[in-house]
Amino acid sequence: MFSEKEIQKIRNQFPILKERVYSNPLVYMDNAATTQKPLKVIQASQDYYNTMNSNVHRGLHYLSHKATFYVEKVREKLQKFIHARYSSEIIFTKGTTESINLVASSMDPFLKKGDEVIISCIEHHSNFVPWQVLCKKKGAILKIISIYENGFLKLKDFEFLISKKTKIVSISHISNVLGIINPIKNIIKKSHEYGALVLIDGAQAPSNLDLDVQDLNVDFYVFSAHKMYGPTGIGILYGKKKILEKLHPYQFGGEMIKNVSFNQTTYSDLPFKFEAGTPNIEGIIVWGFAIDFVKEIGISNIQSYKKNLLIYAVKRLSLIDGIQLYGKSNDFSKKSGIISFNLNKLHCFDVGSILDRLGIAVRTGHLCAQPLMEFFKVPGMIRISFSIYNTFKEIDYLFEGLLKAKKILLK
Ligand SMILES: *Cc1c(COP(=O)(O)O)cnc(C)c1O
């Protein structure tokens, strides 16, 4: 557990936390949307342009070699970070959304009429729409795992839905709305018994959990850099080598070809087969510094600190008369630092606007999960999500802010 002083030292690494919002100190609680960036990440971006900007894997000149070297270093860093077997199993993409679209598009030739795809009702639109579109196009059937009132997946439902017809199961590791950590290892094991592939949307996981894709035995695992202190516009698709080799490329162009002639083209080997065009070179290299930041603090330290914030916040917020917390559980080992709620019958935008005036940044609305809003029969929710730089005092300030919002809005 970190002392207040240690957290202050970490906070000092984030210049944006010194910003003032309508003359109040910034209280940033929208980390599930994107985290803030530490100084070493911000500086790495400038260093990249000052010392190595050039295109990768093409030039023979010094700068091109240097940039290529660092890009490939980060690929290896990510390989170690998620315990992948080969670095060529790490494909750079724009982020979680593009990674899922890549897999959905590349699966197209392997899906036929009557085949089935399973997702769940808590999925982010990024892990919902690509499968819905693919199924419509192919005449395949999209099956959706339901949840209990407390937001936990109905595993019985899953066991009922899975069959030899299931070609792929795509589930989030941690819900971006409810913060629930899904039992993905069981889901993966069960899916494999029926010969289905599994994709895990890990967008909320890498700064919360130790990841071991080999231990999970997952076929595809995807996440973005920007929710783990890194830059936007960069993420990965991890895929098992054997499976990636069988999949068709997602996009075509430079970098992904071996030979192009007037009549035909042969593709590069992994990972380049899936990396058409100039990649986000800066993003990749800068991401390496964000990974270092996470490793220096230690994922398990981040995890346990955030858990303490979560427990404290749930306790405080539960004291507010008329608050409705979603995805509530007494088992905090199944939860990450995300809380979504509504206050009395107030509209989430009204509450969010008052919090904003107090300098508190929260998420409001459908949270990119409209089917889940439909399940709870609400137009939207208010979401707070923690990071390593949040404090217990900020939670107290939020608590006061919510009381203030009630007073103003319930008049
Ligand atoms: C943020 C998020 C996404 C989308 O990530 P992008 O970086 O916007 O592509 C998908 N799924 C979950 C669970 C998320 O939290």
Image (spheres, grey):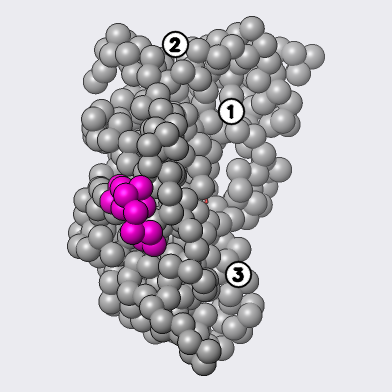
Mark identifier at residue 393: 2
The quadrant of the image that shows the N terminus is top left
Residue 283 rendering spot, x and y as whole percentages = 44, 44
Q: What span is in magenta? A: 57-70
| Mark 3 lies on residue | 132
Front-most of residues 224 and 409 = 224
Q: Amino acid at mark 1?
A: Val
Q: Which mark is residue 362?
A: 1
In percent of the image, x 48 and y 58: which residue is there?
278
Q: Nearer the viewer, residue 399 or 245?
A: 245
Residue 126 to residue 242: above or below: above
Mark 3 CB in 8 Å range of ligand 1? no
| Mark 2: amino acid | Lys
Q: Secondary structure at mark 3?
A: helix
Q: Nearer the viewer, residue 201 or 178?
A: 201
Q: Is residue 135 above or below residue 86?
A: below
As measured in the structure, the alpha-carbon distance from the residue carrying label 1 to the one carrying label 2 is: 16 Å
**Tag 1 secondary structure:** loop
Horizontal and vertical percent position of residue 342: 62, 32
Main SS category, magenta section:
helix
Q: CA distance from mark 3 to mark 2?
A: 43 Å
